[in-house]
């Protein structure tokens, strides 16, 4: 199957082929736009600060962001602009490689170290997505494509830095739930040499009729947290209180969202957020996300400490690996995967 990028570049499209037309997009394309200030902002330097008051204020903000949005921007995180720029540049160069250089990674299985392709699950997707992807399992075993030649080094450093950020955020999130700072990291073995990290790079080529196609349909992510950045072109929208909110990231910020395993672990207290990626007619958009989860063989189930006050268990436990398989076996759609695990209480 053609990548969207090839399709756009080879034939000079003026309209969207019918296989990419999203029938249900039009009704909700009039999304509510908000200023970036409205989205919660977490100053990472305060989270790691030695000033107990500022740290505790930031933990409260973080808890509220998880409770009310499932989404926040992280600033002052200490990752250099240079590394972020290099990461975007190398990713763009990967998508620009000749087809024969990318072919070795095409059409492979979920747990293959590196795979690239188009849409989400092109075997079952009824409508194709206006999106090409590169997915790399980067931890516990680091993998990198051999081209472009500078990619591996930058990728390794970027993934280490985002793992460190995830670890610190999870400490703050644990505390915001009234648990020990190390609770989530220890229970989920995040930050251990076994924790799982998947890098997903998305390429959304310019689309001649952006209102008819979809980059990524509404969905929630697997894992505890996703840390995302983009190439300066907007397109992410987050569902908040029944509206789509367009996200305009602050310069040099990371966009962070809670994933399905945060919802399971917290017994529904911190829900995963539904989000989508829309496309535009002007410029290629690249986004780079890292999903942070436990080792693949970990069974994630609600924390007993969060099932107090007569709140029963709201989700079945599931092995992280099996959840990833479940998600990949279906078409990407809202929180349909998590719905399989809900218990009626
Ligand atoms: O492109 C984006 O901004 C969102 C990407 C995303 O949601 C994902 O890769 O799961
Ligand atoms: Fe996502």
Image: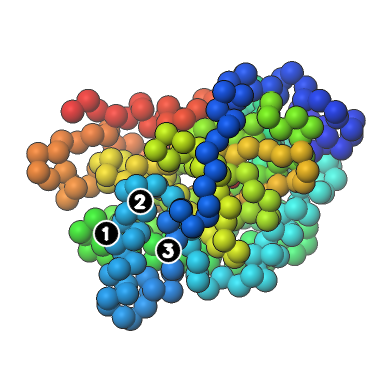
* Residue at the spot of label 1: 176
Q: Nearer the viewer, residue 249 or 171?
A: 249
Work out whether mark 1 precedes mark 3 in sequence or the reverse, and give the earlier one: 3
Question: Gap between marks 1 and 2, in whole Å?
Answer: 9 Å
Label for residue 66? 2
Check whether the beta carbons of the residues at disc 1 and disc 3 lie within 8 A of each other.
no
Q: Nearer the viewer, residue 165 or 321?
A: 165
Can you give x and y, in whole percent of width and height, for residue 211 in the image?
68, 29
Question: Gap between marks 1 and 3, in whole Å?
Answer: 13 Å
Position of 209 compared to 300: left or right? right
Secondary structure of the residue carrying tag 2 is: helix
- Whether residue 297 appears in this view of the structure is no
The residue depicted at 52 percent of the width and 55 percent of the height is: 36
The residue depicted at 60 percent of the width and 25 percent of the height is: 25
Can you give x and y, in whole percent of width and height, for residue 8 in the image?
83, 34
- Whether residue 279 appears in this view of the structure is yes
* Residue at the spot of label 3: 42
Q: Quadrant of residue 135?
A: top right
Secondary structure of the residue carrying tag 1 is: helix
Tell me if mark 3 has few (under 14), some (14-19) or many (20+) residues whose alpha carbon lies within 10 angstroms of its own: many
Question: Gap between marks 3 and 2, in whole Å?
Answer: 11 Å
Tell me if mark 2 has few (under 14), some (14-19) or many (20+) residues whose alpha carbon lies within 10 angstroms of its own: many
């Amino acid at each position: 199957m053609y990548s969207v990028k090839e399709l756009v570049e080879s034939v000079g499209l003026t309209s969207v082929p019918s296989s990419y037309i999203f029938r249900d997009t039009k009704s909700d394309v009039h999304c509510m736009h908000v200023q970036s200030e409205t989205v919660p902002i977490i100053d990472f330097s305060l989270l790691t600060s030695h000033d107990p008051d500022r740290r505790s204020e930031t933990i409260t903000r973080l808890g509220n962001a998880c409770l009310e949005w499932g989404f926040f921007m992280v600033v002052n995180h200490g990752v250099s602009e240079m590394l972020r720029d290099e990461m975007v540049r190398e990713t763009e160069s990967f998508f620009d490689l000749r087809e024969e250089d990318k072919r070795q990674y095409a059409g492979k299985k979920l747990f293959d170290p590196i795979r690239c392709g188009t849409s989400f699950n092109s075997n079952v997707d009824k409508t194709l997505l206006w999106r090409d992807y590169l997915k790399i399992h980067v931890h516990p075993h680091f993998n990198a494509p051999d081209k472009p030649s500078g990619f591996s080094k930058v990728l390794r450093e970027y993934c280490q830095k985002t793992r460190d950020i995830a670890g610190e955020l999870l400490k703050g999130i644990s505390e915001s739930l009234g648990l020990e700072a190390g609770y989530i990291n220890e229970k989920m073995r995040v930050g251990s040499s076994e924790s799982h990290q998947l890098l997903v790079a998305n390429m959304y080529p310019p689309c001649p009729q952006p209102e008819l196609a979809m980059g990524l349909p509404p969905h929630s992510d697997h894992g505890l947290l996703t840390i995302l950045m983009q190439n300066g072109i907007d397109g992410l929208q987050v569902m908040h209180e029944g509206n789509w909110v367009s996200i305009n990231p602050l310069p040099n910020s990371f966009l962070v969202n809670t994933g399905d395993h945060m919802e399971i672990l917290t017994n529904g207290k911190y829900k995963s957020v539904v989000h989508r990626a829309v496309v535009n007619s002007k410029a290629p958009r690249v986004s780079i996300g890292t999903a942070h989860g436990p080792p693949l063989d970990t069974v994630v189930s609600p924390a007993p400490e969060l099932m107090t006050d007569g709140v029963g268990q709201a989700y079945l436990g599931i092995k992280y690996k099996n959840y990833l398989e479940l998600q990949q076996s279906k078409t990407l759609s809202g929180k349909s995967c998590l719905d399989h695990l809900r218990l009626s209480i």
